[in-house]
Amino acid sequence: MNNKVLVFIFLSIINYSFGQKLRKITNTDKNYEISIPEDWEENMSFYSSSLSLMATKTATSEDLKPVEAIAIKHLKTDQKDFDTAYNEYLGLLKNYYTTNFQIAKTENVTYNGVEFKKIIVKITSEINGKNRKNTMLYRYSNGESMMITLTSTNKNYEKNKELYQKILSSLITRE
């Protein structure tokens, strides 16, 4: 087999497996940076004091109505510790997702030296009734809760697990 063909096949496999190029977004007001796929579109019209990032996957010929999105939300809280603030956040989630809300997995994780609570949630969308599988990260610091949500369909969640991990592990937060 020709060496050029082998190199092409190898590079194609690398691009397919690890492929999404990411671009860094830095928010100096909320003290974080995160990398998202370069072809995801930011929708700044949703930005407010409580929503600092909203980006969605763009439609392609293979996926005409993509569901993938990332949002970063912030909520001031009177709670004084992580566990109490986290329980407050869970209550907000359960009130928001009133239909078919299920926590599939919870774990403590550390990204770039900062501890988070990671939650995998299965929900039914209130907007269109479709099943979703979301990855949510929760952090509490200095009277503010920070929530990062990656939204996906069940099928795309399985297909893009590595990409979602790459996005989440790029998160850097500062006090």
Image (cartoon, helix red, strand yellow):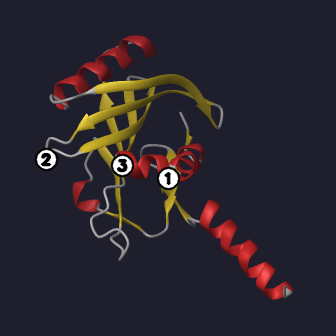
Residue 81 visible in the shown view: no
Toward which corner of the image does residue 19 lie, by quadrant?
bottom right
Q: Amino acid at mark 1?
A: Asn
Residue beneath the point at 65% across and 38% down: 112
Count the marks: how many?
3
Q: Contact (CB < 8 A) between labels 2 and 1?
A: no
Residue beneath the point at 40% across and 33% down: 146
Query: Is residue 116 positioned above or below 82 on the image?
Result: below
Residue beneath the point at 80% across and 79% down: 6
Identify the residue position indicated by label 1 in the image.
Answer: 160
Going from the N terminus, do you reach mark 3 or mark 2 first? 2
Q: Contact (CB < 8 A) between labels 1 and 3?
A: yes
Going from the N terminus, do you reach mark 1 or mark 3 first? 3
- The 10 Å Cα crowd at callout 1, few under 14, some 14 to 19, many 20 or more, is some
Identify the residue position indicated by label 2 in the image.
Answer: 127
Q: Position of residue 140 (x, y in %)?
A: 44, 24
Query: Is residue 159 positioned above or below 39 on the image?
Result: above
Q: Secondary structure at mark 3?
A: loop
Identify the residue position indicated by label 3 in the image.
Answer: 152
Q: Is residue 53 left or right of residue 4?
A: left
- The 10 Å Cα crowd at callout 3, few under 14, some 14 to 19, many 20 or more, is many
Q: Secondary structure at mark 2?
A: loop
